[in-house]
Image: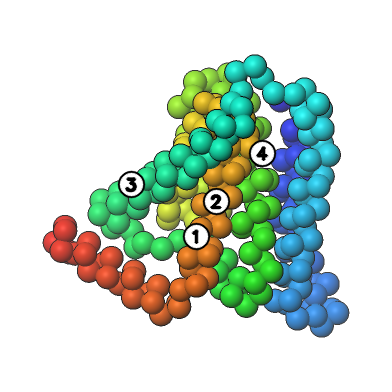
Amino acid sequence: MPKRYWYVIMTYIIMQLSGAFLVPLIDKLNIDRFTFSVSWSIISFVAALVITLLLLRPDMRQGSDRNASGAGGIIGWSALGVAMAYMAQYAAVIIETLVLGIKPGSENTMQIMEIARAAPIFIIIPALIAPILEEIIFRKIIFGSLYKRTNFFIAALASSIIFGLVHMDVTHIITYTGMGLVFAFLYVHTNRIIVPIITHMAMNTITVIAQFSMDPEDLDQMLEQWEKMQMILIGG
């Protein structure tokens, strides 16, 4: 793996942990924690994205592979990728709820939506910035490096599990893994990292808009109805 890839990974890790190191400073300066957290999250994500793109300039100069999809393929596979990702997500939810008995609803998503409702500007992170960083790191770097040494399934599964663990939502690791497998397939099939990026952006944006426009009580009611349906289907 090139050194610049390790630098990108280190940048991402530092960005994720940076907020925790600043907590003592917040207390000393008597700054509102929520306001600071939202502001710092946006600043740190943007900074990490800029640094990542600068580090990957050699990759950008190389140009695209001959087998890479053109503009039409990028648009088509990105749209199809959204449908594939939702199908994978739906299949994973069925396994989690009906087989493993895990309650539906991602804690990670709910936390993001709580912040977004209080500070709408925060939406730019899950909708735009995070998908770019995550696809570069988990698909281009981690999956791409493993794929050169192993086969698709091992590389895709390993990178997808890491992708799920980073979201700190172990309960729904199957859902994150399913989506990661789809993103890896799109990357290999089109030979364009922009395709899983667009698909990831679209999925996150749709999810954020759908939940942002939905009253939290309505969302809880939907989850309760799903649990009742689960009890009917499997008898409790």
- The quadrant holding residue 5 is top right
Q: Is residue 221 above or below residue 185?
A: below
- Across and down, in percent, residue 180 comes to 50, 40
Q: Amino acid at mark 4?
A: Ile
Question: How far apart are labels 1 and 3 at the CA level?
Answer: 17 Å
- Reading the image, the residue beneath label 2 is 202
Circle 4 Cα neighbour tier, 10 Å, few/some/many (<14 / 14–19 / ≥20): many
Gap in angstroms between the C-alphas marked 3 and 4? 25 Å
Nearest to N terminus: mark 2 or mark 4 = 4
Q: In the image, is 132 to the left or to the right of 11?
A: left
Q: Earlier in the sequence, mark 4 or mark 1?
A: 4
> Residue tagged by mark 4?
136
Front disc: 1 or 3: 1
Q: Which mark is residue 91?
A: 3
Amino acid bearing label 1? Thr
Determine whether, in the image, residue 58 is placed left or right of residue 150.
Answer: right
Residue 63 picture quarter: top right
